[in-house]
């Protein structure tokens, strides 16, 4: 394997894992792309799409992948780049070892080539009710204010862009497990901290205590290592472990201190 790109190099080599459909076999195809300084992986894929000819000079089909914002906000362009799950919009060619190897994330079903179906992740967010419900369209007036110290750490959790990288890195998220993954757990912490979201905190905690919830986290801590936004996922998992434990005790002993007494703690 060679070193990262040098300024005098003329071409970039890509080895891309391809799949023509969900039930089709995988194969690899090599491409070369003219080098430009400051290229990212997506701009190279765009070059291949404009001229889908492989390294052998054979005409082929354009590469399929997802993208949207191109500035690490939407999370759609996640893929495995040189063995690591990450965003292709922020993967600069100059900093990658050659040949650059691209593959789809393995945690999610492949649609085609580098494009995957992240429905599993969105289903997990539905399961834990990762939203603040507002009943009706009438004017509710100004909402409650969050204390500044709580707002600061809650803002860090709100950076999640459902890219799926943390699920890809987690050894407990696979096709033989229904574990909801670290992103959904962290979102429970976020929405339970919200003054309005806290009204439904117990529902979210109950969801975390069901099959596929917190009990299936193996504490590998891979998730926090790969999160492109630096979200403290393991801190959220620890906080939710504490909250679900307190909730279990209160449910068992019939606490009369109110339905959301511990659910809004950090």
Image (cartoon, grey):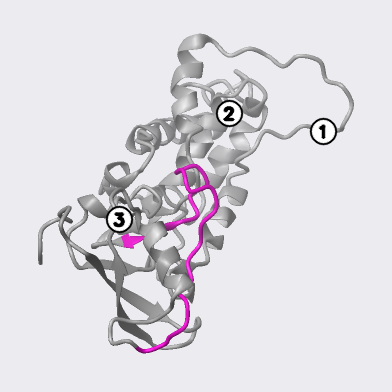
Looking at the rendered image, the quarter that the N terminus falls into is: bottom left
Q: Residue furthest left?
A: 2
Distance between mark 2 and mark 3 Cα atoms: 66 Å
| 148, 95: nearer the viewer | 95
Looking at the rendered image, the quarter that the C terminus falls into is: top left
Q: Residue at x 87, y 31 (%)?
A: 137
Q: Is residue 170 visible?
A: no
Q: Residue at x 52, y 31 (%)?
A: 190
Find the magenta span and give its range: 58-80
Residue designated by label 1: 135
Where residue 76 appears, x then y in whole percent? 50, 55
* Residue 133 on the magenta segment: no
Q: Is residue 85 visible?
A: yes
Q: Is residue 255 above or below residue 5?
A: above
Residue designated by label 2: 254
Q: Residue at x 30, y 65 (%)?
A: 34
Contact between labelled residues 1 and 2, with CB atoms less than 8 Å apart: no
How many numbered discs, if any?
3
Residue designated by label 3: 36
**Label 2 vs label 1, nearer the camera:** 1
Q: Is residue 264 above or below residue 4?
A: above
Where residue 71 appears, x then y in whole percent? 46, 43
| 36, 212: nearer the viewer | 36
For residue 38, the mark is: none
Q: Earlier in the sequence, mark 3 or mark 1?
A: 3
* Residue 67 on the magenta segment: yes
Q: Is residue 54 above or below residue 142?
A: below
Q: Earlier in the sequence, mark 2 or mark 3?
A: 3
Where residue 160 appears, x then y in whole percent? 48, 40
Mark 1 crowdedness (10 Å alpha carbons): few <14, some 14-19, many ≥20: few
């Amino acid at each position: 394997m060679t070193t990262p790109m040098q300024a005098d190099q003329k071409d970039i080599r890509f080895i891309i894992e391809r799949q023509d459909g969900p039930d089709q076999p995988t194969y690899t195809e090599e491409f070369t792309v003219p080098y430009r300084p400051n290229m990212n992986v997506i701009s190279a894929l765009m070059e291949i799409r404009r001229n889908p000819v492989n390294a052998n000079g054979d005409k082929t089909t354009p590469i399929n992948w997802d993208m949207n914002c191109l500035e690490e906000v939407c999370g759609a362009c996640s893929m495995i780049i040189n063995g690591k799950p990450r965003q292709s919009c922020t993967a600069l060619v100059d900093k990658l070892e050659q040949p650059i190897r691209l593959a789809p994330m393995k945690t999610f079903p492949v649609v085609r080539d580098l494009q995957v179906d992240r429905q599993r992740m969105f289903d997990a967010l539905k399961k834990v009710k990762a939203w603040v419900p507002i009943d009706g369209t009438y004017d509710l007036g100004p909402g409650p204010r969050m204390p500044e110290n709580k707002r600061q750490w809650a803002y860090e959790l709100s950076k999640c862009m459902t890219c799926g990288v943390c699920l890809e890195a987690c050894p407990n998220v696979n096709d033989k497990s229904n574990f909801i993954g670290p992103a959904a757990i962290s979102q429970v912490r976020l929405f339970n901290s919200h003054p309005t979201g806290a009204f439904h905190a117990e529902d979210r905690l109950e969801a975390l205590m069901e099959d596929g919830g917190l009990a299936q986290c193996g504490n590998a801590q891979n998730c926090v290592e790969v999160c492109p936004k630096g979200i403290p996922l393991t801190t959220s998992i620890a906080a939710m472990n504490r909250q679900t434990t307190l909730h279990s005790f209160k449910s068992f002993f019939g606490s009369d201190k109110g339905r959301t007494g511990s659910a809004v703690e950090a």
